[in-house]
Amino acid sequence: MGTHGYAAPEYIMTGHLTAKSDVYSFGVVLLEILTGRRSVDKTRPNREKNLVEYARPCLKDPLRLARIMDPAMEGRYSARAAQSAALVAYRCLSGSPKNRPDMSAIVEALEPLLALTDDVPVGAVGPVVLFVAATDAAAEEKRERAPRKDGRRRRPVSPKVSPRKRGAAKNDEFWVWHLPAEQKA
């Protein structure tokens, strides 16, 4: 039996597993990495409980993608790499197995993203600046206190609450942000 939230639609309907079923499951994991959310989260509003149903429509639109990216990354990732990875996830999560790529094609698409280090900040989405990379603690504190342009209060993100934040640097690859930074001897 497939794990709820990761099982491909055809497996749920027929009970038959294929390599394309695994591709679908990989797409769910990739989506979890991009968004920082679980595949099924019953604590979220009804329309957001199933991550694939909620987020897949956002994966092809850079502005919508920026809105669902993991806030713990605070914009410290390559926007081009995130968009490319999101397109891979979109294809993996196709409802039709024949439209999903092979794992070899996924690897070919994801490997070059490790080299992307564009400095384009992800953030300007409508009237709200989503993420601002602070260069020091004072700048970060000032940013957290500043009201958002839409008038809502910011919710502070604490490194104690989000340990994944610790290893991130401005140009880290988006899927390794949660690893501790390497110590240079």
Image (spheres, grey):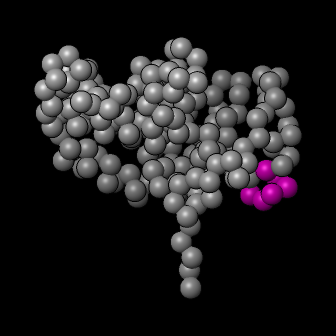
> Residue 136 in magenta?
yes
Quadrant in the picture for the C terminus: bottom right
Residue shown at 54% from the left, 14% from the top:
46
Res. 120 in view: yes
Q: What residue lies at 68% left-to-right and 47% top-to-bottom? A: 161
User: x, y (%) of residue 85?
Assistant: 38, 41
177 or 50, nearer to the observer? 50
Q: Nearer the viewer, residue 145 or 10?
A: 10
Highlighted range, magenta: 135-140
Q: Nearer the viewer, residue 102 or 158?
A: 158
Q: Quadrant of the N terminus?
A: top left
Specify whether residue 89 is painted magenta.
no
Compared to residue 78, the image places residue 66 above or below, namely above
Q: Determine the residue positioned at 79% across, 50% down.
A: 140
**Residue toward you, 14 or 125:** 14
Q: Residue furthest front?
A: 1
